[in-house]
Amino acid sequence: MNKFEDIITQLKDELDTMTFSETIREARDRIGLMQYRTAEHLKISLSRLKNLETGYFRVMPSATEIRDICEFYELPTELMIQKAEQHIAERAREKKIRTIHG
């Protein structure tokens, strides 16, 4: 097993305790990637990646965004969709955002 696989395996063991944002930020940090490089690879803007990683997003990540992130970090897509949906629901309950589903 290579270093990347070791990191991702360890991260998967901790998924239950992390939010969508924490998971993708932690995956990037553990691997040692810069945000701008990750955004380039995922073909999203740097500001979008920053918003996703900090939990400051009003628009549900698209199925393509989530799929691409999950493929890149080798994360379970269905679980990450659930985490993103949970985040949007919690933010709406806290009235921190007006939800927009895209």
Image (cartoon, rainbow, N blue to C red):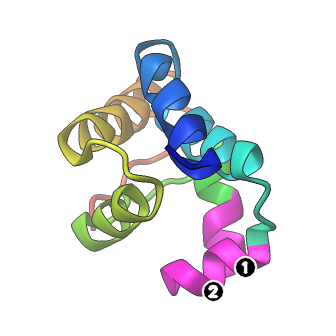
53 horizontally vs 86: left or right: right
Rendered-image quadrant of the C terminus = bottom left
Element assignment for label 2: helix
**In this orientation, which residue lies closer to the viewer: 34 or 99?**
34
Q: Amino acid at mark 2?
A: Glu
Q: Classify residue 67 as left or right of residue 61.
A: left
The percent position of residue 86, horizontal first and vertical second, equals 34, 29
Where does label 2 land, which residue? 40
Q: Residue at x 34, y 62 (%)?
A: 71
Residue labelled with disc 1: 37
Taking the view exactly as shown, the residue that stands out farthest to the top is: 17
Q: Position of residue 76 (x, y in %)?
A: 27, 42
The image quadrant that residue 81 belongs to is top left
Q: Which mark is residue 52?
A: none
Disc 1 crowd, CA 10 A, few/some/many (<14, 14-19, 20+) = few
Q: Along the horizontal axis of the image, is 22 left or right of 31? A: left
Magenta-drawn segment: 36-50
Q: How many marks?
A: 2
Q: Position of residue 53 (x, y in %)?
A: 65, 49
Question: Which is more toward the observer, 73 or 54?
Answer: 73
- Residue closest to the eye, 32 or 90: 32
